[in-house]
Amino acid sequence: MARESWRSSLRPRIAETRAALAQATRDSLIQRGGLDLHPLGIALDLVGKRYVIRWPELVVEEVSGEECPEELQALVLDYLARADGSPPSGRWLGFRELPHGDFYWRAFQGYTGDDLVRCLNGDTASFRRGAERLGGRPVPMGDAAYAFRALPNVPLAVVWWEGDEEFPPRATVLFDAVAPRYLPTEGLAIVGRMLCRRLIKLGTDEG
């Protein structure tokens, strides 16, 4: 019941964002957001999964045609509304360095990096397996690290430390410095959580 109430609370914001986006052209949205043209409108990849934004209705759908839940509608539409075409900077930020991130970084670390380590039992090989299956690009940080094109113009990275006798394994999510130009901090937190959940699924699947 609480979840449905929360979803209902998102609907006015979704409607407002759609109204604002309707003033733009489809080509401008594609250019600013690094998106793809699709027979039904626009397509983008979010954490390794493709979604379609139907035009001109601006409804976000699975490729199967099923309409996405409100939280995903809001996230993708926020990305479209804020996108300004800025390219990735190549500079990484921790969650605490994002706008207002210092207030929420402990909670964010708990349901991203900490959860990733816990669900993978601290196993670096499982992390590498999940990252490679998700198309991660190795980057020189920690004991293992990969960068991901989480959204078309928003790279994220996950850094993994194996730990030793004194310190347990740990992992942390980083954001390209361009990220706040595309999503508010709460939206980036959702993308970070989605990324870690995908890594857990792919890292624990032996198939």
Image: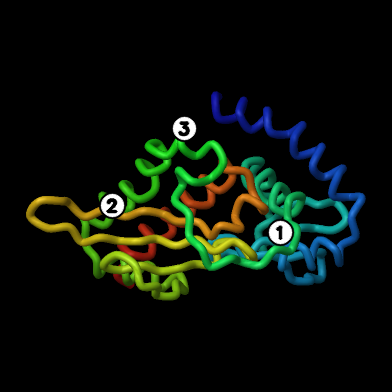
Q: Which mark is residue 119?
A: 2
Q: For the point 74% across and 54% down, which residue is it?
A: 80
Q: For the point 64% across and 64% down, which residue is it?
A: 153
Q: Amino acid at mark 3?
A: Phe
With 205 as the anchor, is 187 left or right in this view?
A: right
Mark 3 or mark 1, earlier in chain: 1
**Residue 205 visible to an observer of this rendering:** no
Query: Label 1: few (<14), some or many (≥20) within 10 Å?
Result: few
Q: For the point 74% across and 63% down, which residue is it?
A: 85
155 in relation to 193, above or below: below
Q: Disc 1 on helix, strand or loop? A: loop
Mark 2 or mark 1, earlier in chain: 1
Q: Position of residue 165 (x, y in %)?
A: 7, 55
Q: Disc 3 on helix, strand or loop? A: helix
Q: Position of residue 52 (x, y in %)?
A: 72, 61
Q: CA distance from mark 2 to mark 3?
A: 25 Å
Report the residue marked by disc 3.
103
